[in-house]
Image (cartoon, coloured by chain):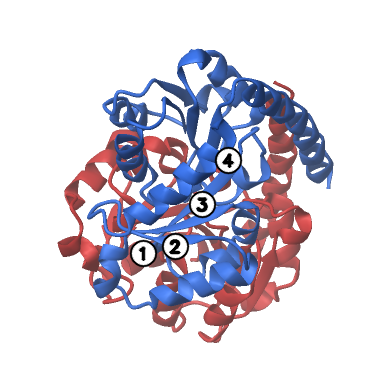
Chain colours: A red, B blue
Amino acid sequence: MVEIKVVKKVLKENELIAEETRELLKEKKIFMVNVMSSPGAGKTLLLEKTINQLKKDFKIGVIVGDICTTRDSERLSRTGAPVVQINTEPFGGDCHLSANVIQEGIRQLDLNNINFLIIENVGNLVCPAEFEVGEDKKVVVLSLPEGEDKPLKYPLMFRVANCAVINKIDLAPYLELKPEQFAKNIKQINPEIPIFQLSAKTDDGLSAWLDWLKKQAKAKIA
Amino acid sequence: MVEIKVVKKVLKENELIAEETRELLKEKKIFMVNVMSSPGAGKTLLLEKTINQLKKDFKIGVIVGDICTTRDSERLSRTGAPVVQINTEPFGGDCHLSANVIQEGIRQLDLNNINFLIIENVGNLVCPAEFEVGEDKKVVVLSLPEGEDKPLKYPLMFRVANCAVINKIDLAPYLELKPEQFAKNIKQINPEIPIFQLSAKTDDGLSAWLDWLKKQAKAKIA
């Protein structure tokens, strides 16, 4: 039971730092979105496409969390956006990005040249949901091959998320599952959440997601 | 930095309890395998098939970890094996099964009628890798749609695993990736690890995995 108390203490400290970040981003008029998912749900490709579409409207910066490797940040750097890579392995292979790590990442960026900050979190459907980092919106990305029961099995992530993306819908014909059941299961956990079904690979459904994201950012920046 | 020290302390306590479990299972001649993966990699279907194939040779028991829901344990119960369900939500939605939770789960089983214990861990490619639970073998299940970079991005899991299963190979024709690159990336992290490519859905490649698992169990039980 020791573990539980400890987690609570860590979460409280985390919340204080997240609040500092929230204040800073409010002052600087920077919108920040925290994108979370299982490993392999397709966050990086989705963000590559997203940044390429939005970079004419916003000054985008990116913070990428990974336990190891710089693959995702290299891919995202090709969009031209400034990217801060955080490898959590020196911190014991941390399974999420905590508020202090994000605060440190933000310090590496030129905040006068950014108004739209994207966090690509560590691939994990559990722990990142517990850690506020000072973001305006949390997005969970789920991919079709993961199965329609995931929202029921990992409810906290879907409860805290402000938007759910169901990715890889191009694989639907080859999977024995009902895509509409995904949305139904997500709504069971979080009835009001907007859901976007799309394929980052084929661009199918991408525009509705981009519109939603633009609207959220403009509401803060304007 | 507080967080890191805390994790180390928890891990040390965890190891002591795992050692108690190891002693108990040695005395009772019970083989225990800990099966880990991302959410949606197909652990439950793989285990359903595995139990149905092995139940004539072994007295199988199962401990299933989930944050929420009893779906997986209901599916596995249909094999006829005794199943203990652990929901981690009362413990703050824990992202892994720790040694004390497994010890408690084992207490619920009739150990005189079991010689092969399967743990289906919480879907998470990060945290479960850090927690010994007293198992004889650790198995990591990866599914093809997750992408071939996962072993490089989540190296600890592949470093500690005694065996890797690459599941959902039936989807290979519809994915833009090279299945052989998966094995190559796994070997880069863990050169000696046996790797089984299979589809739990079509049974393709299942027998080599079953043979390996039987051999490991017999080596301990005999």
What is the number of the mark on residue A130?
4
Q: Are marks 3 and 1 in contact (CB under 8 Å)?
A: no
Residue type highlighted by circle 1: Pro
Q: Are marks 4 and 3 on the same chain?
A: no
Identify the residue under disc 1. B145
Q: Nearer the viewer, mark 4 or mark 1?
A: 1
Identify the residue under disc 2. A40
Residue type highlighted by circle 2: Gly
Q: Nearer the viewer, mark 3 or mark 2?
A: 3
- Say whether residue A173 is visible: yes
Along the polypeptide, which appears first: circle 3 or circle 1?
Answer: 3
Query: Residue A130: image x %, image y %?
Result: 58, 40
Identify the residue under disc 3. B140
Q: Chain of mark 3?
A: B
Residue at 58% in and 69% down:
B187
Q: Residues within 10 Å of mark 1 (few under 14, many from 20)?
A: many
Q: On the picture, is A116 further left or further right than B48?
A: right
Q: Regarding mark 1 in the picture, which secondary structure is present there?
A: helix
| B183 to B198, vertically: above or below | below
Quadrant in which residue B205 is drawn: bottom left
